[in-house]
C-alpha cells in the first residue's frame, strides 16, 4: 500500500510545484499536459490500489493452514514463517498432487537452502504422512512446542499497475511536450515562409494608392474568401486584427497586437513600420516595404536551400540501401555462374 501513497505524494508535489512556478509548464505541454499527466497517474494509481486492497494484502495464518492438492501434479507455494514470533524466513512448500490410478513418476524435491529449512521440511512431510489426507496438504501450527505463524505474500499486481501508470503518465507528458514543440516549430517555419509574400502584396497595394488600413483589410478579406483548409497563421492574425479594429480597438493598438500575436521578429518589425506610418506618416513607406520584401525573399531562399540540404541528407540512407540492392542483383548471379 505504501507505493500508492508515494505515487499520490509525488503527483501532488509535482502539481503544487507547477502551480507555484518552480517548474515551467510551457516545455511540458502547458496546463493541458499537466492535467493529462495527473489524470493518468491518479486514475492508474486508484485502479492499482483497488487491486492491492482486493488481492495485495499479505495473508497471515497463526493456526496452521491447509493447501488443496491438485490433480495436475506437484506445485509450489512460498510462505514466510516465524517461530514464536521472531526469526522470519522464506520457505518453499511443495504440495504433492492428488493420487490417481496412473501415478506419475515422483519429481525430485527442491533442495532446502539451510539446515533449519531442511528440518522444517521434514517435519511438515512427517506431519502430513501422519494425517494421510488425500485432498489437502497441511502446514502445522506448532513445532516442538514452538508456535508457527505462516504468512503468504500478497499479489504485487496492484503496485506494478500503479508504477506502470506513473511511468505512462511521464511518457504521455513528454509526448505532449514533444507535439507542442513540433507544432510551434511548424508554426514558426510557416510564418517565416509567408512573410515575403505578405509584405510584397502589402507594398503593391500601398503603391496602388491604398492606405495602410485599407490594404490591411483587403488582404484579410481576400484570405477570408479563399481560406485554405490548413489555415495560415499570419493571415489569421491579420483577420483577428481587422476584427479588433471593427470592434473599436485603436488602429495603432491592433497593429501592435498583430506583431505580438505572430511572435516573430520580422512581423514585429512590420507592425512597427505600420505604427510609424500611422503616427508620423512616411512618403517612402512603399519603398521601405519593398526593400523589406526583397530582404525577406533572400532570407526565404537561404531557408529553402537549408531545407533542401536537410532533405538530401535524409535521402542518403535510402540511396545507400538501393545501392546495396543493385550490387546484390549484379554480384549474386556473377558468383553463381562462376562457382557453377
Image (tube, rainbow, N blue to C red):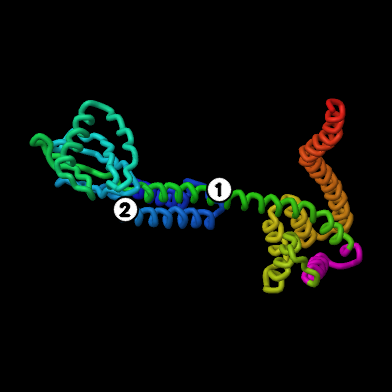
Identify the image quadrant of the C terminus: top right
Q: Residue at x 56, y 50 (%)?
A: 26
- Per the model, the C-alpha gap separating discs 2 and 1 is 33 Å
* Extreme residue toward the bottom, this view: 247
* Residue 318 to residue 293: above or below: above
Q: Is residue 149 visible?
A: no
- The answer to which quarter of the image holds residue 49 is bottom left
How crowded is the residue under tag 1: few (<14 C-alpha within 10 Å), some, or many (20+)? some
Query: In the image shown, does 59 or 37 lie closer to the viewer?
Result: 59
Q: What element carries label 1?
A: helix
Query: In the image shown, does 325 or 52 lie closer to the viewer?
Result: 325
Q: Name the residue under label 1.
A: 174
Q: Position of residue 148 (x, y in %)?
A: 15, 39
Q: Which of marks 2 and 1 is in front?
A: 2
How crowded is the residue under tag 2: few (<14 C-alpha within 10 Å), some, or many (20+)? some
Query: In the image shown, does 240 or 38 lie closer to the viewer?
Result: 38
Q: The magenta stretch spans which residues?
A: 205-224
Q: Do the residues labelled 2 and 1 touch (CB within 8 Å)?
A: no
Amino acid at each position: 500500500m505504501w507505493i500508492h501513497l508515494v505515487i499520490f505524494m509525488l503527483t501532488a508535489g509535482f502539481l503544487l510545484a507547477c502551480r507555484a512556478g518552480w517548474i515551467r509548464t510551457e516545455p511540458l505541454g502547458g496546463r493541458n499536459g499537466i492535467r493529462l499527466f495527473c489524470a493518468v497517474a491518479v486514475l492508474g494509481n486508484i485502479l492499482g490500489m483497488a487491486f492491492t486492497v482486493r488481492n495485495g494484502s499479505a495473508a497471515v495464518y497463526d493456526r496452521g493452514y491447509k493447501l488443496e492438492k491438485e490433480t495436475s501434479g506437484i506445485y509450489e507455494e512460498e510462505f514466510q514463517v516465524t517461530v514464536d514470533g521472531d526469526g522470519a524466513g522464506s520457505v518453499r512448500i511443495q504440495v504433492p498432487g492428488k493420487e490417481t490410478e496412473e501415478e506419475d513418476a515422483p519429481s525430485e524435491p527442491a533442495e532446502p537452502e539451510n539446515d533449519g529449512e531442511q528440518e522444517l521440511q521434514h517435519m511438515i512431510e512427517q506431519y502430513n504422512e501422519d494425517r494421510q489426507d488425500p485432498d489437502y496438504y497441511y502446514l502445522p501450527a506448532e513445532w516442538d512446542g514452538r508456535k508457527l505463524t505462516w504468512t503468504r505474500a500478497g499479489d504485487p499486481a496492484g503496485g506494478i499497475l500503479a508504477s506502470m501508470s506513473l511511468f505512462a503518465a511521464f511518457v504521455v507528458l513528454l509526448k505532449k511536450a514533444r507535439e507542442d514543440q513540433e507544432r510551434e516549430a511548424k508554426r514558426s517555419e510557416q510564418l517565416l515562409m509567408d512573410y515575403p509574400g505578405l509584405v510584397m502584396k502589402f507594398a503593391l497595394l500601398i503603391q496602388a494608392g491604398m492606405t495602410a488600413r485599407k490594404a490591411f483589410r483587403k488582404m484579410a478579406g481576400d484570405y477570408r474568401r479563399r481560406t485554405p483548409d490548413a489555415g495560415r497563421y499570419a493571415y489569421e492574425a491579420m483577420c483577428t486584427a481587422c476584427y479588433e479594429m471593427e470592434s473599436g480597438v485603436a488602429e495603432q493598438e491592433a497593429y501592435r497586437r498583430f506583431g505580438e500575436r505572430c511572435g516573430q521578429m520580422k512581423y514585429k518589425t512590420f507592425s512597427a513600420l505600420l505604427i510609424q506610418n500611422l503616427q508620423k506618416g512616411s512618403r517612402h513607406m512603399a519603398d521601405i516595404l519593398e526593400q523589406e520584401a526583397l530582404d525577406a525573399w533572400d532570407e526565404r531562399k537561404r531557408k529553402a536551400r537549408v531545407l533542401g540540404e536537410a532533405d538530401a541528407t535524409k535521402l542518403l540512407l535510402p540511396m545507400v540501401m538501393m545501392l546495396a540492392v543493385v550490387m546484390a542483383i549484379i554480384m549474386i548471379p556473377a558468383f553463381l555462374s562462376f562457382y557453377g
